[in-house]
Amino acid sequence: RGVELDLRVALAEQQFALAFQPFLDLASNRIAGFEALLRWHHPVRGVVSPAAFVPIAEETGMIVPLGEWVLRQACREAARWPQAFRVSVNLSPVQFRSADIDATVIAALREANLDPHRLELEITEGVLLQDNPSTLAILHRLKGIGVRIAMDDFGTGYSSLGYLRAFPFDKIKIDRAFVADLSVRTDALAIVRAVTTLADSLGMTTTAEGVETEEQLAQLRAAGCTEVQGYLVSRPVAAEAVAPMLQGA
Ligand code: G
Ligand code: G
Ligand code: NA
Ligand code: MN
């Protein structure tokens, strides 16, 4: 397929880049880390969102080399930051199905000389849905060396509660759909409160995604969220913009 070839060429010709979006710790009001978000700087189409090409990369298997590039690049960038912030990397379920993802992660950490405690992997319940017995072993192995594991897009799937029991996540990312609903539906706040309480009792932290207004921030603070992420704090920025942002922080 044309797109698969495009992706191969793009990887070879270094058309991919990472954008970084900070998350803010609400207790200290300080940046706690950055999520790495993949961008394709297409020579004709301009900047292409991962929503447009990750599904194709998954279908064709290109997500394996592409995901490896993301891991290595994110670790390399984080190692150059002036302070030891965390870096979060999104992993596709397909990366667990093929390839030894744990070896890839460990190699990326070693190559960048990055402390494993600074790396966080964001997985969706799709990873656990595959019912692959090696998935849990891989997650436990990575957690064992200090890598943090976050459940992404929490609340959007079918049986997220079951997945929380299947693996001891360090962090739950509350999907931005719930945050968007905070101003329009009173039950959204009840749901966020329930998730933060649940996370607390399971020894996990929470990050609310897609925070755009001061009102949402105040509600999330009152609900006991650990961290927030969203346009209110910052849009995703280019790698070169991370260090200047930290100097101002
Ligand atoms: O940054 P943006 O809102 O365009 O991201 C759209 C979607 O692409 C989000 O669901 C995000 O999690 C996903 N995404 C961003 N970067 C990566 C990546 O490096 N790997 C994978 N698998 N998904 C990513
Ligand atoms: O699925 P995931 O949570 O990884 O998606 C991350 C995506 O959400 C990124 O593509 C990013 O651009 C987008 N995003 C980040 N902050 C906000 C926000 O405050 N509002 C909205 N609408 N999208 C956001
Ligand atoms: Na994510
Ligand atoms: Mn998410």
Image (tube, helix red, strand yellow):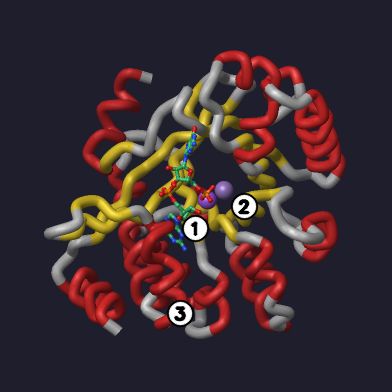
Amino acid type of disc 1?
A: Asn
- Please name the residue shown 67% across and 82% down the image: 134
The front one of 117 and 245 is: 245
Query: From the viewer's perspective, is residue 5 above or below residue 190?
Result: below
What SS does tag 1 mark?
Answer: strand
Specify whether tag 2 is near ligand 4 (CB below 8 Å): yes
Q: Position of residue 223 (x, y in %)?
A: 76, 24
Q: Are marks 3 and 2 in contact (CB under 8 Å)?
A: no
Q: In the image, what residue occupies the spot 44% across and 35% down? A: 22
Disc 1 packing (10 Å; few <14; some 14–19; many ≥20): some
Q: Quarter holding the N terminus?
A: bottom left
Which label was assigned to residue 59?
Answer: 3
Is the residue marked by circle 3 packed among few (<14), some (14-19), or many (20+) residues within 10 Å? Answer: few
Q: Position of residue 36 (x, y in %)?
A: 40, 49
Mark-to-mark CA distance, 3 and 2: 21 Å
Badge 3 amino acid: Glu
* Residue at screen point 53% across, 76% down: 94
Which numbered dot is residue 152? Answer: 2
Looking at the rendered structure, the kind of residue marked 2 is Asp
Which mark is on residue 120?
none
Residues under numbered marks 2 and 1 in contact, where contact means CB atoms less than 8 Å apart: yes
Question: x, y (%) of residue 66?
Answer: 35, 70
Q: Which residue is mark 1?
A: 90
The crowd level at tag 2 (other Cα within 10 Å; few <14, some 14-19, many 20+) is: many
Q: Could you tell whether 85 is left or right of 2 in the image?
A: right
Quadrant that contains the C terminus: top left
Please determine whether, in this image, residue 26 is positioned above or below residue 90: above
Relative to the observer, which residue lies in front, 99 or 53? 53
Q: Which of disc 1 and disc 2 is earlier in sequence?
A: 1
At x 45%, y 29%, the residue is: 231
